[in-house]
Image (tube, helix red, strand yellow):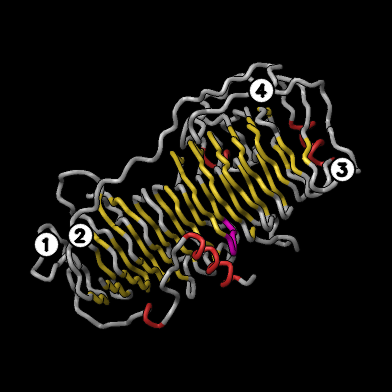
């Protein structure tokens, strides 16, 4: 199935289809004098700023009532799961999301069998389901990795709801499914001198992997501290991996990102390829030390139903450390996040659809170059009433806001700062969207078109 067919099929599935692509109408060069975008048809709005000169087109702009207050991100009730060494069973939590473990409790394993490295044989069929037996209360990274490596291609590892201590992380060796387990990395080295803290799960140049019904815990307890030395411990790191499926997976207290997608390094390698055809159907990150989701190099992918709770940095952060690479042809849908940044090179369109809880969005000029288009549709913003940074700041490239609600946070103070800022040869088209004033401006090199 081609890229266009994949994107169309996804939007048919979620019942929406972005109405805009890159066209000549999006890059409008209309010479106009400075216009106060906070002005209604009847006259200027109280508290509106005087905009700088720019190219602005306003078609029937009206002032809308403030959007209703947004609900806070979902909270998680205390866990009801209890495990004892040698118990051989766990009970389910009443909540769909497990709370963060701060700190992670002492090592507990729910396996009761004697130590072994594998229960599979080379004659098992590819569709077989297998388990790995390990001693209670110990780090089983080595034996669990050996067990996975000995499994046949296409097999399913079922953790049977057990808890595994994996301080060295898990590396998925080949195409397979990992399901129904809790993985705990108790590593608490807060000031590593190098970036060598292993991801809890890594899929490195392996295709056709499924991760489902997993709870993944790190030991990070001080949100936003420690910085770059913790970057390498993602809950899940995908590196040059294709056709990975993530379903109903939750990460907690990771030192680095909850979920990271990146190319293999170094750049000179022939297998230095982006992550492609990722399909996410339910991912939640809580208390990530860095980003909730970091799509560094991600192409032709769909991330559906993602929730970010308390991230040390930006919840969703499109960035790349490799020049002229980055992401493209991606869809982020049904997300609950506080912010999305697209700050570095993007070679193809990014669609954000039906997201809530956003306090702001940044599209940086060095990251979005023609012909890349960022389309944000059916999405709700709760912008700060008074902030030195505009709620949606576009610095170059093309952006379409379609049927969005750009409101303000709860409060009684007068709104003084703009919702939109369009600069650096940028083009923004706002269609059928509710914008609570002050609206904002475009500079002399850019175009802002607002159509009800």
Q: Distance between the residues labelled 3 and 2?
A: 65 Å
Q: Is mark 3 on a helix, strand or loop?
A: loop
From this viewpoint, which residue is outermost toward the right? 123
CB within 8 Å, label 4 to label 3: no
N-terminal label among 3 and 2: 3
State if disc 2 and disc 1 touch (CB < 8 Å).
yes
Q: Classify 17 as above or below 416.
A: below
Circle 3 is placed at which residue position? 124
| C-alpha distance separating marks 1 and 4 | 64 Å
Secondary structure under the numbered disc 4 in the rendered image:
loop
Which residue is label 2 attached to?
A: 438
Residue drawn 61% across the image and 56% down it? 278
Q: Residue at x 65, y 50 (%)?
A: 238
- CA–CA distance between discs 1 and 2? 8 Å
Q: Which of marks 3 and 2 is in front?
A: 3
Q: What stretch is highlighted in magenta?
A: 296-301
- Within 10 Å of disc 2 (Cα), the crowding (few <14, some 14-19, many 20+) is many
In the rendered structure, are the residues bearing label 3 and label 1 in contact, judged by CB atoms less than 8 Å apart?
Answer: no
Q: Name the residue under label 4.
A: 89
Question: Depth check: 409 or 91 in front?
Answer: 91
Q: Name the residue under label 1.
A: 45
- Quadrant for the C terminus in the image: bottom left
Residue 361, quarter of picture: bottom left
From the image, which quarter does the N terminus lie in?
A: bottom right
Give the image location of residue 161, x and y in percent.
65, 30
Q: Is residue 29 above or below residue 146?
A: below
Residue 197 is left or right of residue 337, and the answer is right
Q: Distance between the residues labelled 4 and 3?
A: 26 Å
């Amino acid at each position: 199935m081609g890229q266009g067919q994949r994107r169309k099929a996804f939007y048919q599935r979620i019942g929406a289809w972005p109405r805009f692509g890159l066209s000549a109408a999006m890059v409008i060069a209309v010479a106009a004098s400075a216009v106060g975008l906070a002005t209604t048809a009847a006259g200027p709005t109280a508290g509106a700023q005087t905009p700088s000169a720019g190219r602005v087109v306003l078609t029937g702009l009206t002032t809308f009532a403030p959007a209703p207050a947004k609900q806070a991100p979902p909270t998680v009730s205390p866990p009801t799961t209890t495990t004892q060494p040698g118990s051989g069973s766990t009970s389910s939590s009443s909540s769909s999301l497990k709370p963060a473990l701060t700190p992670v409790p002492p090592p507990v394993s729910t396996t009761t069998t004697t130590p072994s490295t594998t229960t599979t044989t080379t004659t098992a069929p590819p569709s077989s389901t297998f388990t790995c037996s390990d001693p209670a209360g110990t780090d089983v990274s080595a034996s669990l990795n050996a067990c996975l490596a000995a499994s046949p291609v296409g097999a399913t590892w079922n953790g049977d709801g057990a808890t595994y201590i994996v301080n060295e992380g898990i590396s998925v060796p080949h195409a397979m499914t990992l399901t129904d387990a809790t993985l705990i990395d108790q590593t608490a080295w807060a000031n590593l001198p190098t970036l060598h803290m292993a991801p809890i799960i890594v899929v490195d140049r392996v295709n056709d992997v499924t991760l489902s019904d997993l709870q993944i815990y790190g030991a990070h307890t001080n949100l936003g501290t420690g910085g770059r030395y913790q970057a390498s411990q993602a809950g899940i790191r995908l590196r040059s991996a294709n056709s990975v499926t993530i379903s109903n997976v939750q990460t907690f207290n990771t030192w680095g990102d909850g979920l990271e997608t990146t190319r293999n390094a170094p750049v000179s390698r022939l297998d230095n390829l982006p992550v492609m055809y990722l399909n996410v159907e339910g991912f939640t990150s809580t208390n990530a030390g860095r980003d909730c989701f970091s799509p560094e190099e991600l192409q032709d992918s769909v991330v559906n139903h993602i929730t970010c709770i308390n991230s040390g940095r930006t919840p969703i952060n499109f960035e790349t450390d490799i020049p002229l690479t980055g992401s493209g042809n991606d869809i982020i849908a049904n997300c609950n996040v506080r912010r999305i940044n697209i700050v570095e090179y993007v070679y193809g369109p990014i669609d954000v659809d039906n997201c809530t809880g956003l306090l702001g969005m940044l599209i940086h000029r060095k990251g979005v170059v023609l012909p890349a288009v960022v389309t944000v549709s059916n999405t709700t913003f709760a912008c700060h009433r008074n902030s030195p940074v505009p709620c949606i700041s576009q610095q170059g490239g093309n952006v379409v806001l379609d049927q969005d609600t750009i409101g303000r946070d709860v409060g009684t103070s007068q709104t003084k700062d703009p919702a939109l800022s369009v600069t650096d040869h940028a083009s923004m088209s706002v269609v059928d969207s509710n914008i609570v004033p002050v609206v904002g401006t475009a500079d002399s090199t850019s175009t802002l078109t607002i159509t009800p």
